[in-house]
Image (cartoon, grey):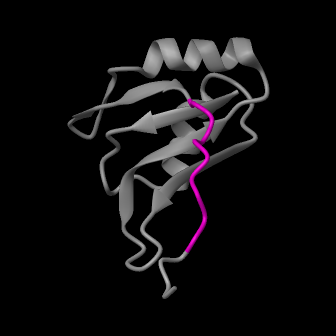
């Protein structure tokens, strides 16, 4: 299951996410999303857990939990919306 983790402190790293969610079971991946130009965290990330039951336990335990003074938003990630590709060039 893919899990969205929002309202992350900007200092949180991929390893911090792994440590936090690793307490609930096996992880396939954990990534803090960063701005592609500055490298600064965007304040959210995604965790992938192969076991749905472990993922559900992590969501229940960590949603609205406090991390470094911020209340986390943790839920099952929604599929990405299809966005039109295109570049706004000249006609």
Outermost residue to the right: 50
Highlighted magenta segment, given as a residue range: 77-86
In front: 91, or 32? 91
Q: Principal SS element in the magenta part?
A: loop
Answer above or below: position of 59 versus 16: above
- Name the spot of residue 29 as percent of width and height, x first: 69, 45
Position of the N terminus, as image quadrant, is top right
Q: Is residue 80 left or right of residue 54?
A: left
Q: Is residue 20 left or right of residue 52?
A: left
- Name the spot of residue 36 as percent of width and height, x first: 47, 74
Outermost residue to the left: 69
Quarter occupied by residue 18: top right
Q: Residue at x 45, y 26 (%)?
A: 74
Q: Residue at x 60, y 42 (%)?
A: 80
Q: Is residue 68 left or right of residue 34?
A: left
Answer above or below: position of 79 versus 91: above
Q: Residue at x 75, y 30 (%)?
A: 26
Q: Residue at x 63, y 22 (%)?
A: 24
- Name the spot of residue 65 as percent of width and height, x first: 34, 22
């Amino acid at each position: 299951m893919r899990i969205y983790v929002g309202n992350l402190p900007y200092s949180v790293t991929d390893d911090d996410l792994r440590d936090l969610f690793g307490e609930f079971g096996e992880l396939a991946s954990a990534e803090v999303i960063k701005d592609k130009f500055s490298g600064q965290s965007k304040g959210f990330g995604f965790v992938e857990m192969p076991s749905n039951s472990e993922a559900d336990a992590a969501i229940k335990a960590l949603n609205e939990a406090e991390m470094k003074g911020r209340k986390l938003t943790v839920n099952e990630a929604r599929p990405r919306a299809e966005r039109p590709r295109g570049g706004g060039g000249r006609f």
